[in-house]
Image: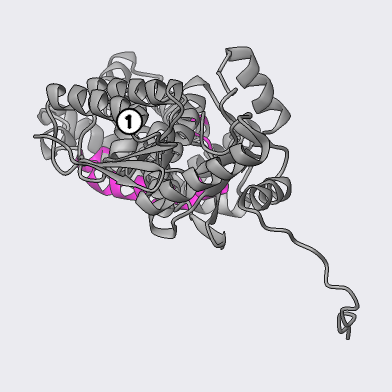
Amino acid sequence: MQVPILKQRDYLIASIQAALTDEDLKHLRDALVAQVGEYRSRGVIVDVTALDVMDSFAVRTLRDLAHMTRLRGAETVIVGIQPEVAFAMTQLGLRLEGVAAALDLEEGLAYLDRQAKRSTLRGPGPHSGHRA
Amino acid sequence: MSPVVAHLERDESTVTLLRELVAHLRQNRTQLREEWARRITEAKLLTAMSADEVFAEATAVYDNYLEALETGSIEALEAYARNLSERIIPRGVETDEVVGIVLLLRDVLARSLFAKYRQNFDLLSRVLDAYEPAANRIAITVAVGFVQERERVIRQQQEAIRELSTPVLPVRERLLILPIIGIIDPQRARQLTEQLLHGIRVNRAKVVVMDITGVPAMDATVANHLVQTVEAARLLGATVIVTGLSPEIAQTLVNIGVDLGKMNTVGDMQGGIEEAERLLGYRVAPVRDAAPAVEE
């Protein structure tokens, strides 16, 4: 199943609606990394609210996605991780290092807006907030 | 204890002998009881209880003891031992004291039997054959009853501690505090993390101040749980500020090499809340020209 990617202002939003295969995930990653350049996007939001499970492949793919888009000039935020999923991920030692996370789509957009404001004010600088 | 073992197996002659020695012990009840109470005081046992109380309990134990000897049934004694334990455990009576007094009673009674049958060694030997297993069984019953009661109390307390909820409290919009008091075991750590994560979602919190002033000690497992909780909260978009690490805990964490680099720590809860307010963009300022507080 392909994940639709929506363009909203400077941001790309990918909302995952059902469990994805590894292939789907890779496809999503490649599509987002490509489209960031195409649309000159400043931010990417991946909504995983619908996912009940995140395995190591999914976590790694999302982390890679975030690092790749950053290299292409866009910040990625993962939004909507369920509490149970978050707990299981930490238990299993699956870390989203260096990747921003937010509660839901709205928070994710707010986060990207703040990041954008910061970078226009001061240029790219150390990120504060939720990046570990 | 099952009814099968509650009855001592005994043959006719043993029963007769025991009946005889119980009659002897009943006859000398006053004197033996006093002797026993005196030896308890001498041995500095049951210091948590007054002399009168010791004597009253001694009387009750003595009578129950004789009954158990006579009938071979330790059920009544068991019930009494449980009841006694319930009363004396809260007063700080230790296991060695309880075992000690029962063994003292066994010895006092044995001495009295030696005195009575010293003319007839053969008979004494048979009396002791009957007496010793019964007396030992009684001692075990009382000790086990006491220990079981203690364990029951400990279990009950553990349950109570576990049920002490760890509240997740909203202080301001998007700011939660989580004061943790007491030992964190893996089960509690799990429960804590779950409560925190749901609290974050329900309150849409951005910052959580987790105060561990009330946590007396921390080992690698618990520290790891803490790091995991912080990471899980981050996945929901919330920053966790940990406050109130005692010097001991700080030392422990550094010594065992837990990576706390990713953790936001502030000295105390007040500092933590101030830092949280800064992160959230609040500024708290005193109101100028405020009316002075009304004092009575």
Instruction: Please say whether residue B132 is visible from this viewpoint.
Output: no
Q: Is residue B170 above or below residue B29?
A: below
State the residue at coordinates (40%, 34%).
A40
Pinpoint residue B41: horizontal percent, then vertical percent: 63, 38
| Residue B84 lies in the magenta stretch | yes
Pinpoint residue B3: horizontal percent, then vertical percent: 12, 40
- Magenta stretch prevailing secondary structure: helix
Task: Find numbered disc 1 in the image and state the secondary structure of the residue it sits on.
Answer: helix
The residue beneath circle 1 is A38
| Quadrant the N terminus of chain A occupies | top left
Q: What number of labels is visible?
A: 1
Pinpoint residue A65: horizontal percent, then vertical percent: 33, 24
The answer to which quarter of the image holds residue B125 is top left
The answer to which quarter of the image holds residue A48 is top left
Choose between A57 and A92: the one closer to the eye.
A57
The answer to which quarter of the image holds residue A117 is top right
Chain of the residue on which disc 1 is drawn = A
Q: Specify whether B99 is left or right of A86.
A: right
Pinpoint residue B5: horizontal percent, then vertical percent: 15, 32
Range of the magenta residues?
B69-96
State the residue at coordinates (60%, 22%).
B261
| Amino acid type of the residue tagged 1 in the rendering | Glu
Choose between B241 and A6: the one closer to the eye.
A6
State the residue at coordinates (55%, 62%).
B173
| Residue B85 lies in the magenta stretch | yes
Q: Sort mark 1 into few (<14), some (14-19) or many (20+) by Cα contacts within 10 Å.
A: few
Choose between A60 and B225: the one closer to the eye.
A60
Q: Is residue B253 above or below residue B109?
A: above
State the residue at coordinates (63%, 29%).
A125
Q: Specify whether B48 is left or right of A79.
A: right
Choose between B181 and A58: the one closer to the eye.
A58
